[in-house]
Amino acid sequence: MTIRLQARGLSRAYRPAGLWASLRRIPGVQAVDGVDLDLRAGQRLGIVGESGSGKSTLMRLLLGLEKPDAGGVTLDGREVRAGADLAWFRRQVQFVPQDPSSSLNPHLRIRDCVREPLQCLGIDADHATRVQACLEAVGLDPGLAERYPGELSGGQRQRVAIARALAPSPAVIVADEAVSALDALVRLQVMTTLREICEAEDVSLIFISHDLGAVCYLCDSVLVMSRGKVVDSGPVPAVFEAPTATETRQLVASVPVQPGA
């Protein structure tokens, strides 16, 4: 299958600033250290690891929000450079945050929240038709388009965030702990929606989570991080049922894997 998003040798360190830190030679933190990643068309890749493993920094590098100290990211062979004009990249790669309230303007109606990326990216389309199609794709009644985010439940707002990400017809969706704040039933419904959309539209997914059960249910492959490095990777069943890295074994032992739980 075609490689959509690729990273080679990605590294990012955070070093304390200021004269005092320099004089004291306070060491920095190597948040991401030489990470390689291949995301193929239609692939659903989970990225897991303990707190501080580098997942969030890797996500920001992949989204072009931070510049790596070394290595690089390409989308369909084109270089992604933080700080450059990335309108072409934003159209192809969309983000679903952990807290949908952070991406939904409380003063806009739902229809306008979903339409916003179409307007910002200058996408020439029938916006009303596209908004309705995206709401239906995530299992929401189009009648909700006239409401405001504060009038919806947490699960409904998360579905709106997914619909908003779908609006530009992206090739890749990056979801950061996108179901962690939801109760069990709603979490399962949202994950099922994401999986069905990826399968139906051949959208690639990067799903960042600490929930191994969610990764088992939603993803077909997984990448395990520890101290900024990739310590394990491969198909989900192989990695979790027969982990080769100590860190993976510890993760599985500490959080029993129950798909969809």
Image: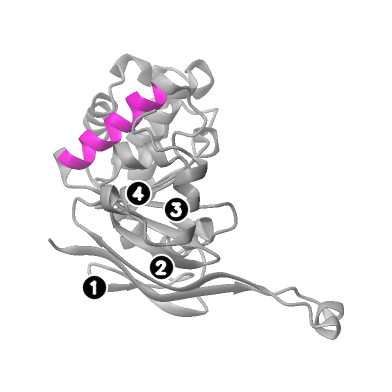
Q: Are marks 4 and 1 in contact (CB under 8 Å)?
A: no
Give the image location of residue 244, x and y in percent: 37, 61
| Residue linked to disc 4 | 240
Between residue 36 and residue 153, name the one nearer to us: 36
Name the residue type under label 4.
Answer: Phe
Name the amino acid, label 2: Asp
Write down the residue under mark 3.
249
Which is nearer the N-term, disc 3 or disc 2?
A: 2
Indicate the position of residue 53 as horizontal and vertical percent values: 54, 59
In the figure, is residue 64 to the left or right of 242? right
> Above or below — where is 92 with respect to 81?
above
Comparing 148 with 48, the one in front is: 48
Asked if the residue at tag 4 contacts the one at tag 2, i.e. Cβ–Cβ closer than 8 Å, the answer is no
Residue 80: which quarter of the image? bottom left
Q: Earlier in the sequence, mark 1 or mark 2?
A: 1
Give the CA separation, mark 2 to mark 4.
39 Å
**Magenta region: which residues?**
186-199
Q: Which mark is residue 247?
A: none
Residues packed near mark 2 inside 10 Å, few (<14), some (14 to 19) or many (20 plus)? few
Q: Position of residue 234 (x, y in %)?
A: 28, 58
